[in-house]
Amino acid sequence: MKGLARQLAALARGDAAADRVVPPAGFTVRLTLFAAAAMAFLAVFALALSLAAGRLADRWGEELARGATLRIQAAPEEMDRQVAAALRVLETTPGVSGARALDDAEQRALLEPWLGPDIPVDRLPIPRLVTFSETGDGYDAAGLRLRLSAEVPGAVLDDHARWRAPLVAAAGGLRLFGWMALLLIFGAMAAMVTLAANAALAANAQVIAVLRLIGATDAYIAGAFVRRFTARALAGAAAGTGAGVLAVALLPGTGDAAGVLTGLGFAGWHWLVPLLVPPLAAATALLATRAAARRVLRDLA
């Protein structure tokens, strides 16, 4: 870490005489700039995916954690009695609050996306739904099921637990995928910068030999390459990050109907997170170039 800090401080100070050792233009310059810009652009999207998946997991967990539903299936003449009995059971169950039966309009609104707007709810054998919430202390689901089986035989309890766990796990998997993609992106950037540094060092083998003859140390020569390639990576990554943030900002709104893709992008202070990409790209280029320079200079000795 101390060596990395010294290299960053040296990069900030600059050394015009040493920088002339590295060719200012050519294939390695274009390769470094393009690789840094492209990888930074992809890194912004990986960050957007990971952060959006995290928000999605939190939202699904909060929305499903406290809600539960009773589905009551009974003959038409028994339905009202069963619903009233279910409400009495829920009102006397510790940990349950806000129990109410959905009316026909609410049930029609729930089924409309699937069955169309003209649903004859009153003539179809559709179960009645009773929704309720649990308090902070929670309720005994097993005990409630036993009471319902005895007092309301047509009621089925759905506490949303079987839906919540897979959804939250899926969102967590998307978040992990985003972070893994980010690691792979920076690994690919390190590989591309290493190739460019190796090519530049090999192309300047004669210049390096002359510098050694006049007393230049390997640390001085390596520092010149490290500074130049780090600056190139920083410039390319800044451009790629800007383009990536602009592309994320221009993504069309998906609305509530998009499901998993809802909210893809940044929100709130997360818009500041992409600002970390250029410094991380510069640090990656610094480490990759330093390792490549040491290896090539050792081979040229």
Image: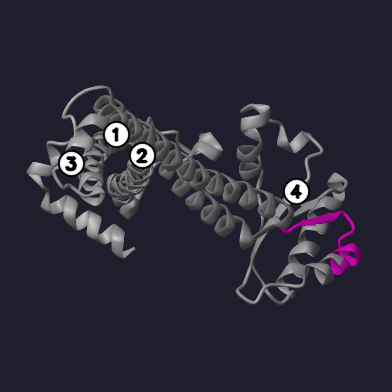
Q: Which residue is mark 3?
A: 213
Q: Residues within 10 Å of mark 3 (few under 14, many from 20)?
A: few
Label 2 vs label 1: CA separation?
7 Å
Sequence order check, earlier mark of 1 and 3: 1
Sequence order check, earlier mark of 2 and 4: 4
Q: Amino acid at mark 1?
A: Leu
Q: Secondary structure at mark 2?
A: helix
Q: Which residues are magenta?
A: 146-159
Label 3 vs label 4: CA separation?
91 Å
Sequence order check, earlier mark of 3 and 4: 4
Between 141 and 36, the one nearer to me in the picture: 36
Between 31 and 66, the one nearer to me in the picture: 31
Q: Amino acid at mark 3?
A: Leu
- In the rendered image, is residue 142 in sight? yes
Residue found farthest to the front: 213
Residue 62 - label: none
Label 3 vs label 2: CA separation?
17 Å
**Do callouts 1 and 3 mark residues in contact (Cβ within 8 Å)?**
no
Residue 210, by quadrant, is top left
Q: Secondary structure at mark 4?
A: strand
Q: Which residue is mark 1?
A: 201
**Do callouts 2 and 4 mark residues in contact (Cβ within 8 Å)?**
no
Q: Which residue is mark 4?
A: 128
Q: Amino acid at mark 4?
A: Arg
Q: Residues within 10 Å of mark 4 (few under 14, many from 20)?
A: many
